[in-house]
Image (cartoon, helix red, strand yellow):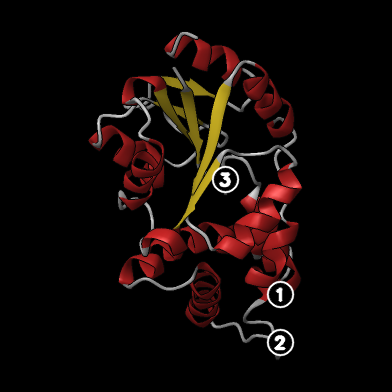
Amino acid sequence: MSRWATFDCYGTLIDWNAGIGGVLERLFGVEQAPRLLERYHELEPEVAAEEYRPYAAVLTLTLERLAQEVGYGFPEGESGALAKSLPDWPPFPDVPEALEELRRRGWQLAILSNTDRDLIAASERRIGVPFDLTVVAEDVGSYKPATGHWQRFFELTTADRDRHVHVAASLFHDIAPAAELGLTSVWINRLGEPTDDRPARELPDLAGLPDALDDLVEP
């Protein structure tokens, strides 16, 4: 019987802080970027929750609101800088090897991501490991923590929930809704946040993930 591991992408597999932070440094300066990055992550969920928009539009609108809030003007033509930069955001170094090992052990892999089809395709090319299924916000018309991604995943795969684990770095976008759905999850706590009791496992990166998943769901 199949074992499925579903993954959030940005922040879990792809280093979006490096990607977003690089754009903020270029537009607003190195000294301001860390503070602006923190505020960006507060604003983006608010924008995403207003109504469904393509993720490229969410990125652009969030960046515009951030600039307005802090009183910075944009260089002409730069409001879409985040969406343009996303295809170049790098995967975390631990990701390709861990995913390859999971495939070697027989796990089927899926991405459940708050993004658009064209953007996720670029990120999957950067990761370089094939996925069996990808569900994005464009497919379901909503953004996590709404549960449409998981609903679509189970509709398409008819996966056994007892043989499925969701893997993610965001408590807000992923671990909390997975818990509400009664799903097993692994929290990739890349930022060293305080321990949470909702995930079945907590790891600092993906290096130990194959063993953790095998422990949670036997072959």
The residue labelled by disc 2 is: 75
Q: Nearer the viewer, mark 3 or mark 2?
A: 3
Residue in view at x 54 percent, y 83 percent: 71
Identify the amino acid type marked 1: Leu
Question: Looking at the image, do the residues carrying marks 2 and 1 touch, with CB atoms under 8 Å apart?
Answer: yes
C-alpha separation, residue under disc 3 versus residue under disc 2: 27 Å
Badge 3 marks a residue whose secondary structure is loop
Question: Residue 145, percent across and down?
Answer: 34, 50
Identify the amino acid type marked 2: Pro
Residue in view at x 66 percent, y 29 percent: 99
Depth order, front residue of 174/71: 174
Depth order, front residue of 3/214: 3
Badge 3 density bin: few <14, some 14–19, many ≥20, Cα 10 Å: some
Residue in view at x 48 percent, y 35 percent: 6
Q: Left or right: 66 with respect to 52?
A: right
Q: Which mark is residue 27?
A: 1
Q: Left or right: 201 with respect to 92?
A: left
Question: Residue 173, percent across and down?
Answer: 39, 47
Q: Quadrant of the N terminus?
A: top left
Question: Residue 194, percent across and down?
Answer: 42, 30
